[in-house]
Image (cartoon, grey):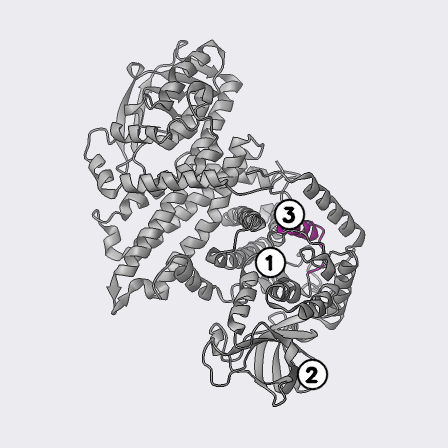
Amino acid sequence: MDLNYTEQQVAFRAEVRQWLADNVPAEPLPSFDTAEGFQAHREWEAKLYEGHWGMITWPEAMGGRGADLLQWLIFEEEYYAAGAPLRVNQNGIFLLGPTMMEYGTEAQKQRFLTGMATGKDIWCQAWSEPNAGSDMAAIRAKAELSADGQHYIINGQKTWSTRAVWADWAFGMFRTDPESERHRGLSFILVPLDLEGITVRPIPQLDGLPGFAEIFFDNVKVPVDCLLGEEGKGWSVAMATAGFERGLMLRSPARFQQTAKRLVELYKENQATADADPTVKNAVLKAYMDAEAYTLLTYQTACRLVQGGKIGPESSTNKIFWSELDRDMHAAAMSILGARAELLAHAPAAENVGNWLDGWLFSQSGPIYAGTNEIQRNIIAERMLGMPR
Amino acid sequence: MNFTFTEDQLLFQDSVRDFLVNEITAESIRALWETETGRSDALWQQLTELGLTAMTVPEAMGGLGMTALDFILIAQECGYVALPAPLVHVALVAVPLLDQLSGVSGEALKQQWLPAIAEGRAKVMVGLEQNAFVEDAHTADILILQRGQALYALTPEQFSYTLNESVDPSRKLYSVSWQTSEASLIAEGEQAQCLIDGAMNRGALGVAAEALGLSQRMVDMTVSYTTDRQQFGKPIGSFQAVKHLMANVAVKLEFAKTPVYKAAYAVAEQLSSANVNVSHAKLAATEVAQLAARNTMQCHGAMGYTWEVDLQIFMKKAWVYNNAWGVVAFHQGRVSDFIFADQAAIGAGNTFVA
């Protein structure tokens, strides 16, 4: 064990910090759940790509830097510390990207990964259906091979597709074998959202913005080269994606460390009122410690992976931990802000309330998306602890 | 940056675990409860033969010259079996304290006791004022006791002791009566404070590691119990209400381990962050131990409330560790003082800055 950064890691951090200092917009971008904000975030992705910072762990040939996971953690730390914009293409770069590295053909990698890294193609997920939520194996949307074998003809409905309103592509699972049941006969297919027969109906979230959507497919013709992995083997491809989502990539610890830091500052600025509730101080303390614990475990996992180890079923604990941490941190902030906590940002008296309300609203979704925490608890009990099914 | 243990460290942990799980059974622990001292010389000899009493003793004194980081996984395994012997205390608290003594009398004490500890011939226990009681004073060959900002070394004829029975029958806590004297003084002033603070950190680190092992053991026992126990025609462990109680422990446990390892590293490397790291580790590890005790007892139903079921061996130790080696408020205070200070180095990128 050696918890010192190498000279190269220190130099890498300095390089990231300098680039971010020179390039991060001075004013926060508008929310990417608005048309204007989505465009602004797309342009930011292009800027990141120009500096080769789009997805640093990817090979250089695909717009990356061939960086290892420790460099990725360092990059993320600097990224969040610099207050850089959220990644509008996170579903693409953090979830589909790694899956494609593993399951994609060379042609698919060339075609899709570069488009992802440059921000040209923004991706959304298409997993859930009205009757297939936590029970994902109940998926019914069909993709039937056309008579000439050139296309899949997709019919059905997907829902809760985050950022589908302005995204260019969707990835998800469809039933390619109409006779199949449950997790057999499903295929992982990439769908351009501008095809004929696709209707995207925005769903306003708790904040009123159309952050997610339903997608309706009516005889949509998708070329067969959009199949990722083998036909009928979509479940195992999807499980790899879910692994990345719940595991390492989607929520890097730096995000929560910065929230914890802001929470400490908020507490200090409002200490007199905050201390009226004696539990608040400990909630702030706990936020700091848990964000640190998440960081430490992520570093340990990254070090293990860099040395050739594998992620195990214990990674299911991640998603529960960060989603509950995020909600608890924002709950503490709401307590500190007291009567002002409920004010929308543009309310006349909403001074010094920051963006805690937005964070509080978003934090409500964490225990639900990426597999509800109850599903995660089942996975932990059965696969990690070995309890009976 | 490499936040992993070496193959050797992990292999040694495995072999120690195998030995302990075979030797330290619930039956043997219960048998010790019936003895006068509650301790076994034969067990101490076995631990000595494994090299465990020598681990942290410097090589020049006949030991293996290992650090708190090398020992931390062993402490975890001691918790896993609820080891009824003060190995963690001796190896992690007392030996490094003795080793840090200086001056003529300090050197003499080191020469006298460190080789004896390594060879399993002697036990040295430390009593800090913050601990209220002295552990295992009845079998100690010397006690190192704090009074104010000074430390004293006392041989058994220089103190008397009274047992204070604990809810954990394996725990032997004593009120010790003794007088200070020039002859027994081994450190004072700033030097003593430094030794006291270090001992406090290592003691808290030790129980944090043990709490990880205790939690894992309670989980393992309960997975087994809920797989065997049937109700409604099924193993009770197949019910989500039971699974989720257990999953909640597993999540907390997963995220308590790395703070303990980071703290062990900080102690071994004498990082300036050691106090905060140890307190975080202690809080996280004892918190999961409390939840493990509560949820595993619940999963055992009425059986968990009996003297007969072995869960109590681990559960009671988990309870008492919550306030051993610094009460919760002490450790919270140390982390608070750090994060609420002006210019505190917190936030992304600061975890390994120390």
Dots 2, 3 in contact, CB < 8 A: no
For mark 3, name the chain.
B
Under mark 3, the amino acid is Ala
Q: Which residue is mark 2?
A: A195
Q: Are marks 2 and 3 on the same chain?
A: no
The kind of secondary structure element at disc 2 is: loop
The secondary structure making up most of the magenta span is: helix
Q: Are marks 2 and 1 on the same chain?
A: yes
Under mark 2, the amino acid is Leu
Mark 3 neighbour density, 10 Å: few (under 14) some (14–19) many (20 or more): many
Relative vertical location of residue A121 with respect to residue B249 in this rendering, above or below: below
Along the line of sight, which residue is nearer the eye, A211 or B110? B110
Along the line of sight, which residue is nearer the eye, B334 or A188? A188
Residue displayed at 31% across by 54% down? B222
Q: Which residues are magenta?
A: A69-86
Under mark 1, the amino acid is Met
